[in-house]
């Protein structure tokens, strides 16, 4: 399906998601903003799988281990990562400790691709993610890199967000500035390119769209436009309560 074709309808007020919407794509495509807003609009849960890889990475950095070492893989796979699924207040903890702010820092961002490339880390976190999704009740929006390909291949709707490197770097830069983290656009562009290469080139679960994903280029779309498009697609798939399934 080509998402660039006009999608005529948007979800009616009060629509509730039944099932899983998988949102994959590289960083800076608006994935987190869209996923959270979507979950809030559709009365659904929200799972940020990137935050889980980031929290596991933080545990490794605190232990002073090299991210690409076997010891790091073991420690990350055993880390006590806890995430909440309320889209209004998503939480991420290492044990009892709230690490939501620390996992967004440059150190974690620079090391997370190496940690997420370890098969044993992925195996462990994918099992945990599936448990959270199974226990989520009626509907959940899940964002990551391998949700449509590996974590929930049967998701009712798979969206793959893209945007040009320049647009993505500019968005990341804006987020860093807004959060009070030092920002430098040229360095951010290089970091975005580096992370894309690592995430797309790894042997296990590389970043790529599922064969049945709807690809949406957000370079020229604002969040509201992306949301309208995704909600319309969910409605067409019959994933919204009370909506007829148009494929039947
Ligand atoms: O979405 P994010 O930038 O917070 O993700 C951080 C890193 O975690 C990203 O560089 C790749 C990795 N990741 C992954 O490998 N698989 C996922 N499902 C989510 C994130």
Image (cartoon, helix red, strand yellow):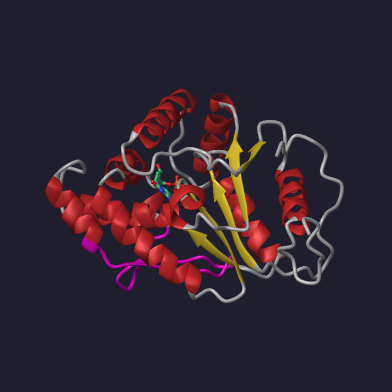
The image position of residue 140, as x and y in percent, is 58, 65
Name which residue lies at 29% across and 60% down: 124
The residue range painted magenta reads 78-100
Q: Which is more toward the observer, 242 or 35?
A: 242
Name which residue lies at 22% across and 63% down: 78
The image position of residue 5, as x and y in percent, is 79, 35
Residue 54 visible at all:
yes
Vertical side of 158 occupied by 165: above or below: above
Name which residue lies at 70% across and 66% down: 42
Vertical side of 192 occupied by 115: above or below: below
Name which residue lies at 26% across and 49% down: 119
Q: Which is more toward the observer, 69 or 149?
A: 149
Residue 84 visible at all:
no
Quarter of the rendering containing residue 192: top left
The image position of residue 172, as x and y in percent, is 52, 37
| Residue furthest to the front | 248
Quarter of the rendering containing residue 98: bottom left
Q: In the drawing, does residue 189 fall left or right of residue 72?
A: right
The quarter of the rendered structure image containing the C terminus is bottom right
Q: Which is more toward the observer, 162 or 130?
A: 130
Q: Is residue 90 magenta?
A: yes
Q: In the drawing, does residue 185 fall left or right of residue 212?
A: left
Secondary structure predominantly adopted by residues drawn in magenta: loop
């Amino acid at each position: 399906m080509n998402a660039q074709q006009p999608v005529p309808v948007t979800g009616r007020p009060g629509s509730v998601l039944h099932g899983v919407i998988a949102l994959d794509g590289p960083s800076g495509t608006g994935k987190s903003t869209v996923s959270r807003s979507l979950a809030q609009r559709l009365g659904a849960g929200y799972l940020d799988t990137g935050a889980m890889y980031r929290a596991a990475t933080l545990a490794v950095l605190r232990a002073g281990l090299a991210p690409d070492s076997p010891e790091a893989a073991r420690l990350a796979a055993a880390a006590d990562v806890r995430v909440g699924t309320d889209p209004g207040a998503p939480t991420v903890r290492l044990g009892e400790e709230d690490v939501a702010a620390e996992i967004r820092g440059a150190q974690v961002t620079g090391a997370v691709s190496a940690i997420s490339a370890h098969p044993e880390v992925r195996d462990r976190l994918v099992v945990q993610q599936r448990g959270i999704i199974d226990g989520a009740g009626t509907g959940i929006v899940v964002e990551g890199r391998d949700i449509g390909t590996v974590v929930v291949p049967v998701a009712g709707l798979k969206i793959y967000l893209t945007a040009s490197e320049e647009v993505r770097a500019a968005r990341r830069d804006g987020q860093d500035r807004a959060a009070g983290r030092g920002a430098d656009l040229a360095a951010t562009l290089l970091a975005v390119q580096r992370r894309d290469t690592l995430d797309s080139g790894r042997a296990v679960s590389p970043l790529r769209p599922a064969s049945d994903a709807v690809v949406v280029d957000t370079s020229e779309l604002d969040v509201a436009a992306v949301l309208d498009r995704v909600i319309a697609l969910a409605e067409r798939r019959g994933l919204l309560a009370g909506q007829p399934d148009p494929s039947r």
